[in-house]
Amino acid sequence: MKIRRLGSSALSALPVGLGSAVRLLAVEAVHRKRHLRGLMKARRFDGRRGMMMHLGCGNMIKDGWVNIDLKPDADLTLDVRERLPFADSAFSVIYSEHFLEHFDYPQDIMRLLAECHRVLEPGGVFTFGVPDGEMVLRHYVTREYADHAQAQLKWNPAWCRTQMDHVNYCMRQDGEHRWYYDEETMRLLLEEVGFVEVERRDFDSELDQEETRVGTMYMRCRKPLP
């Protein structure tokens, strides 16, 4: 029986572990199909320089950018755990928001960061936002950051009744989050793959979503000049 023909009733009849594995395999099969389609579409960018990449765009499509995600709305549906289908130094800017935390640490995230470094032109900017892991833990200990507490109540599910519930949900997000970052950890990764001028930055209304402003750590770095 093909995976796509397994309905919910058939899956529920499987042992819990096997059912989870089959669901994951089905998702990966869809991702692979979309990735192959994205590789074909990426050919139209061959030879172009100075482009801007919106990495992990979700449904937030930016005009004038190459919007990349596995969701169908993206310009290119690419599985960015694989090599990016672009020439070296093809982009002047790469931006992402609440995306890098979805990759296994350290292999997958290091591979992706190295690819971002490769496709950026010398002097090009990589700027992004990820959940602020340090803020979550500081709030757990001190109960400071009233705006963070309000955001927890707004975004986290009702079953989060204790601060430890909130910490676990923020770090896991129903299995979607793979790793949580603070500035020190992210800085080390970026510098290890070759980025320079690594720094935190302020919220940028021209790039970032207002709804995720609270609890986000924004950073910026550059690919060094020759």
Image: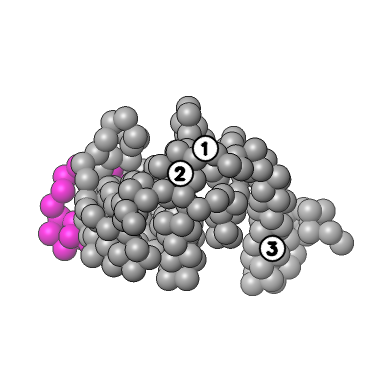
The residue tagged 3 is 25
- Which kind of residue does numbered mark 3 sit on? Leu
Q: Is residue 66 above or below residue 125?
A: above
In the picture as drawn, the residue positioned furthest to the front comes out as 226
The image's mark for residue 91 is 2
Q: Are marks 2 and 1 in contact (CB under 8 Å)?
A: yes
Q: Is residue 37 above or below residue 136?
A: above
Residue nearest the viewer, comparing 193 with 6? 193
- Which kind of residue does numbered mark 2 sit on? Phe
The residue positioned 16% from the left and 45% from the top of the image is 146
Q: Main secondary structure of the magenta part?
A: helix
Residue 52 in sight in this render:
yes
Q: Residues within 10 Å of mark 3 (few under 14, many from 20)?
A: few
Percent of width and height locating residue 144 = 13, 52
With 183 as the anchor, is 110 left or right in this view? right
The image's mark for residue 66 is 1
Real-space Cα distance between discs 2 and 1?
Answer: 10 Å
Q: Secondary structure at mark 3?
A: helix
Q: Secondary structure at mark 1?
A: strand
Real-space Cα distance between discs 1 and 3?
Answer: 28 Å
Magenta range: 137-152
Real-space Cα distance between discs 3 and 2?
Answer: 33 Å
The residue positioned 42% from the left and 56% from the top of the image is 117
Residue nearest the viewer, comparing 172 with 103? 103
Q: Are marks 3 and 2 in contact (CB under 8 Å)?
A: no
Q: Earlier in the sequence, mark 1 or mark 3?
A: 3
